[in-house]
Image: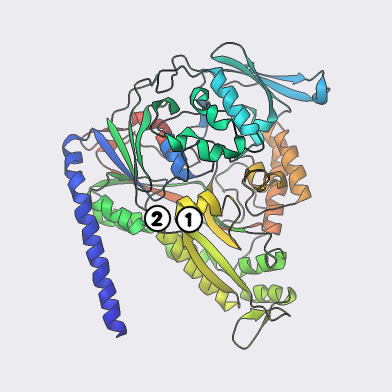
Amino acid sequence: MRASANLGGMIGKAILLLTLLAAAAAPAQSQEKGRDGLTIGITQFPSTFNPMIDSMLAKSYILAMARRPFVTFDREWKLVCLLCETLPTVENGGAKVVTFDEGDLKGKKGLRITWRIRKGTKWGDGRPVTVDDVVFAWKVGRHPQSGVAGREPFLRTVAIERIDDRTFVQVLDKLRYDYNQLVPDPMPAHLETDAFREPKEYRQRTAYDRDPANPGLYYGPYRIARIVSGSHVELVPNETWWGKAPSFKRIVVRVIGNTAALEANLRAGGIDYAAGELGLSLDQASALQRRAANRYRFIFKAGLIYEHIDFNLDNPILKDRRVRRALAYGMDRKRMSEQLFRGLQPVADTNISPLDRVASKEVTTYPFDPKKAAALLDAAGWKRRGDGWRYNAKGERLSLSLMTTSGHRVREQVMEILQAYWRRIGVEIRLRTQPARVYFGRTVTQRQFPAMAMYAWISAPESNPRGTLHSSEIPTAQNNWSGQNFPGFRNAEMDRLIEKLEVTLTLKDRLPIWRRIQQIYADELPVLPLYFRANPYVIPRWLAGIRPTGHQFSTTLWVEDWRAGADAKQQ
């Protein structure tokens, strides 16, 4: 009976795969003929299209084609202007250290930073992008009920002084090493002001979700023309774009939540390209490289991408650091990396990648040690019984849930491996997955995961850790779920170190602060580090211009450089 059921399941899967391939084949032929369009596959659908609400890679990947930040890190990890004309620095006089002479800041040092918006920048409806749009974004970001992902940069800006339509002075309330990364990117005041009249309702009223095809929401090389929720997003060239004209007349971003189905669509031609940032897993790309090197170019880009598990520190079991450490000792991350990723995705000891200049080797590590894990659990009052599970003095079993995004084959494999490891030390793990839109839009953002949540953070070089580690950044109903400290980590020394780090301007003086931050992180384990990811970029040979960055700013920020050509060479 069991063999028959297995065979039936195999046949069902084969039929499903053939259906996917057949469905995918039709659009492939037209793409091959003209190549004036591009179909990209990604694994997640955004929870919102508002640039300021929810931190989700799927959203930023798409919006990077339709918007431009003032500044970004380029492919060489150098900070550069995109929307601004010149990057303001203390050295070139664009940023000036000042001492405040009145008000609450009297006697304190801050910064006055002069910004100028690029000439000719317009929203898609023809309205110029002006300082008014920057001021509006600043007001949204600093409002306690707006629900933006990270309010800290907006709070540090105490004033925006308008010089003319394109020029303004941003006033920061203190010195910051990352001072020229804190400027608010414009939001269309002429379209969003009404939606923000009730700040607590802004999430539900924003035009980015109610009227996302409105051209006036965008000022990049493309604009969103159509959204089919959960399915795809269509972008077309923005007629008011001021920069280099993009090559493709139409870009469709298709969401295929299962990575196996994503690969099937890629091989059949249903999509032209699986986004490296949100596409195939490392093992899938490696296997495809052996079979189809003549069709694709392969780039395996290591970077600042950190797979981890957030602990909910309000969970009474996980409040005990001994339990968190036991879970770390109870899994063999090195072996897992070797088996799943051929060692290409190294074990993470903290949240800072070894590729980052501020990474420290002076941290507590947790090599695989089941005996030490068992001793810690015993000390925490969780004793093993004859059935193999652990119980406390009240007879309650040590049982925890582990959640992640659905359809992601590697994450599901990792979950099953961790479940098996932790069963060996007597910990019951209940596995659960959710669609990414729900998982990131509510479960993680509103701290609704009961115990553990697995996902990845993607950061910029020497990224300020305030948003994820400072106690003021814990999302609550009172702050409308603003902030990204999802574990609920509270540590007075960490708070002081972050505040000191921010006002330390020289790298040499920041390094010891960074070392101590990483040591506290490793000791306290508010988060369980897993590994640093290497993203595989599987690029069709006719597509050129895609250059992975290895940090949080995606390749689509330079989508106007993408083009089609016969066996195009990567540049």
- The disc at residue 345 is 1
Determine contact: label 2, label 1, CB under 8 Å: yes
Q: Kindly give the residue lying farthest to the bottom in the view shown.
A: 386
| Image quarter hosting the N terminus | bottom left
- Nearer-the-camera pick, 458 or 188: 188
**Label 2 belongs to which residue?**
282
- Up the image or down, 245 lies above or below 429; here it is above
Label 2 – label 1 distance at C-alpha = 9 Å
Rendered image quadrant of residue 184: top right
- Name which residue type carries label 2: Leu
Question: Circle 1 sits in a helix, a strand or a loop, which is it?
Answer: loop
- Up the image or down, 94 lies above or below 291; here it is above
Q: Residue at x 27, y 67 (%)?
A: 13
Is residue 458 shown left or right of residue 125?
right
> Residue 322, how many percent across, how many down?
71, 67
Question: Circle 2 sits in a helix, a strand or a loop, which is it?
Answer: helix
- The disc at residue 468 is none
- Name which residue type carries label 1: Gln
- Nearer-the-camera pick, 478 or 341: 478
Which mark sits nearer the N-terminus, 2 or 1?
A: 2
Q: Residue at x 60, y 75 (%)?
A: 427
Q: Is residue 183 visible?
A: no
